[in-house]
Amino acid sequence: MAVVSEIIGEITSAKADNIFLEIYKPEKLEEQKSRYINLLSRHKELFGDVEAMVISAPGRTELGGNHTDHNHGNVLAGSVDFDSVCVISASSNNMVAFVSEGYDSISLDSSDLEVKTEEKDTTDALIRGILFRFTELGYKIGGFNLNMESSVLPGSGLSSSASVEVMIGTALSELFNDGEVGFVEVAQIGQYAENLYFGKACGLMDQVACAAGGVVGIDFKDPAAPVIKPVKVNFSENGYRLMITDVKSSHANLSDEYSAMPIEMKSVANVLGKEVCREISMEEIIANIDKIRKECGDRAVIRAIHFLNENNRAVSQLEALENGDIDTYLKLVNGSGNSSFKYLQNVYVNFMHKDQAVSIALAVTEDFLNSCDPEGPCACRIQGGGFAGTIQAYVPNESMAEYITLMENVFGKASCFELVIRNKPACRVL
């Protein structure tokens, strides 16, 4: 490893430009170089001119398979050009120092890895859980100093937490294990920490999509060995820009709402003698619907129905992209959004019925897309976990600027932006 000042020198001398251009758009090169130099300078200020490395982990966009992963289903997802970046160096003892711009610094002992209930919903819990899982799997850990910065905004639906988890896991793999921990295992370690330490019953899709790079279809029939199938796609070359609008509502305090979705789906499967919805059929639900409604409630039934159809739809979306059939793909995207709103019911929270920013964003977007081309295959849907955060839209290339103006008039400046698929996986950059 090089010391911090040497890494800064590589960036300022343009020696690292090709590395940056594998991750970021050319027009963002100087901005990203400045970002990395600031982060490295901060590390030197905090921890000295020590041997260090720089890690980048992308955010992700879910393209299909809304809440299917946790019931062993299929998803379609892509890494994006917003990322979490950190500088990490080994410390001289067992202590971990974790500094994130805009947040309180974290200090914890890497030899104390018991679950702490008071840390639920905190980054402390994620760090402790990842460290524990590394040791449980036989990997090396130690004390470290890490400072980070992320362009994956919290609550944006781009999986800021999974991006950070994958960043930490990748950093520990590189710093202590010579990069030997594969990206799927890094993803699984992040999920483990989020489930058991952070306290959120997430599936594995977010972490795998953040770790893998590019667009991938993921089959979670066996979560211990997910089948990952990459597909090359450039939406702008097909006439559309993949747009995200941040509706400026927060995911905070909604963990129970997210956890309810996999729990309710699994409850339906349990009534049918199975563990997850991947193991059941629509015919079984209909044949036993009275019993299921009594034991699980109606919302659980329709969420299970959402799963069955969405699981098949994610497979069809992958096939459409493989065949270059953008029209069919976009029709399936609309089907996903429709099912999420009506059956999964993760567009707004029932007890907060006056806060329906996501619904407004979808309504305004649909009206705009219909005005662009009433017969066209343009599409929009909820982005990611739902209830708050962002929506996703496929907007004709020539209408992108007009769409940004419209959505920023509704939700504020810098609320609407293009997502570009990043083909580089989570990795050591320098």
Image (cartoon, rainbow, N blue to C red):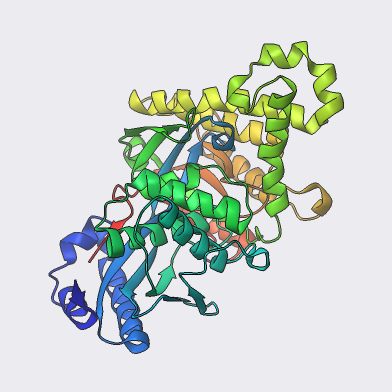
| Count of number-bearing discs | 0
Q: Say if 349 sits above or below 290 in the image.
A: below
The structure residue drawn at horizontal position 33% and vertical position 54%, both measured from the top left corner, is 426
**Where residue 164 sits: x, y (%)?**
45, 61
Q: Quadrant of the C terminus?
A: bottom left
For residue 429, side relative to residue 254 (left or right)? left
The structure residue drawn at horizontal position 55% and vertical position 42%, both measured from the top left corner, is 203
The residue closer to the viewer here, 416 or 71, is 71
Could you tell me if residue 363 is visible in this image? yes
Q: Quadrant of residue 139?
A: bottom left
Q: Say if 257 sits above or below 30 in the image.
A: above
For residue 293, side relative to residue 387 (left or right)? right
For residue 139, side relative to residue 12 (left or right)? right
**Where residue 224 sits: x, y (%)?**
45, 36
The residue closer to the viewer here, 213 or 373, is 213
The residue closer to the viewer here, 241 or 261, is 261
Q: Quadrant of the N terminus?
A: bottom left
Could you tell me if residue 398 is visible in this image? no
**Where residue 279 sits: x, y (%)?**
59, 21
**Where residue 69 sits: x, y (%)?**
54, 36
The structure residue drawn at horizontal position 64% and vertical position 49%, both measured from the top left corner, is 361
Q: Say if 104 sits above or below 405 in the image.
A: below
The residue closer to the viewer here, 146 or 253, is 146
Outermost residue, right direction?
A: 294
